[in-house]
Image: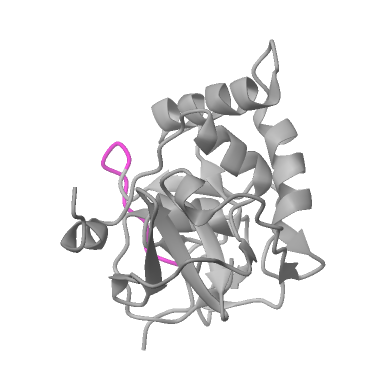
Amino acid sequence: MPLQNRVTPFGDIVAINQRGLFTGNRGIIHDVASKTLLNRRWSSKAWITCALSYKGHWRDVMAQRSWTELFFLDEAVALSAGHRPCFACRRASAEAFRAAWAKAHGLNVPPSAPAMDAILHSERLNHRLKRIHSLTVPLADLPDGAAVVHDDAAFVIVKGRAYRWSEGGYDFAPHLSHADGLLTPPSTLRAMCAGYRPLLHPTVERYRLD
């Protein structure tokens, strides 16, 4: 049985057999003895996205009273769930994200990580549930990696086309012309519009036409 440590675009943490590109955490939210999640789904506002390996260090998942290892299909999913790049193991990506955030928000000084975390925390949750935001532009105008919801399913937009998130990766959704709401937090979306490009899972390439 897989551990309950895969994150969906809705921010839910589920037990599925999915191999992804990133790990990350929201603080300590597991019991070491049973390797199961506690009732809480976060213990810190710093929801980060990390590299699977860093300086040759490897961790036994959920084996330490340390941060709880979570896993994401790709960075679009992590951003949709409300995470941001880690400033330790993904420094270049974190700096690029912060620079795009500052540009999008008209800031002369790049924001601190806690400042971004505070804003993201207000945008990622509606009490304990995922906050769904209004979608004010056509799907075709969304930046690559933006995530939306339609009929309770999550889709990532790439080059104006929709790809449905699934346990096995992405499936092309050629007939999706509108969505019920935006999953990616608005501040993250603005950073993406300002130039930040998330790394996408290679299953998208199976359907790319350009």
Task: Judge left or right: residue 201 versus residue 138.
Answer: left
Residue 76's place in the image compared with 125, above or below, is above
Foreground residue among 179 and 167:
179
Res 62 visible: no
**Residue situated furthest bottom in the rendering:** 1
Residue 56's place in the image compared with 40, above or below, is above
Q: How many marks?
A: 0
**Position of residue 56 measured from the top left corner of the image (x, y, whole percent):** 26, 42
**Can residue 57 be found in the magenta stretch?**
yes
Q: Main secondary structure of the magenta part?
A: loop
**Can residue 148 be found in the magenta stretch?**
no
Q: Quadrant location of residue 180? A: bottom right
Task: Judge left or right: residue 45 versus residue 90.
Answer: right
Task: Judge left or right: residue 155 versus residue 183.
Answer: left
Q: Quadrant location of residue 134? A: bottom right
Residue at left 47%, top 71%?
A: 5
Foreground residue among 111 and 31:
111
Residue 34's place in the image compared with 50, above or below, is below
Res 46 visible: yes
Residue at left 54%, top 66%?
A: 178
**Position of residue 79 measured from the top left corner of the image (x, y, whole percent):** 52, 50
Residue 99's place in the image compared with 146, above or below, is above
- Location of the N terminus by quadrant is bottom left
Q: How is the image coloured?
A: one colour
Residue at left 42%, top 55%?
A: 157
Stretch of the chain drawn in magenta? 54-62
**Position of residue 33 measured from the top left corner of the image (x, y, whole percent):** 53, 78
**Residue situated furthest top in the rendering:** 108
**Position of residue 65 measured from the top left corner of the image (x, y, whole percent):** 57, 61
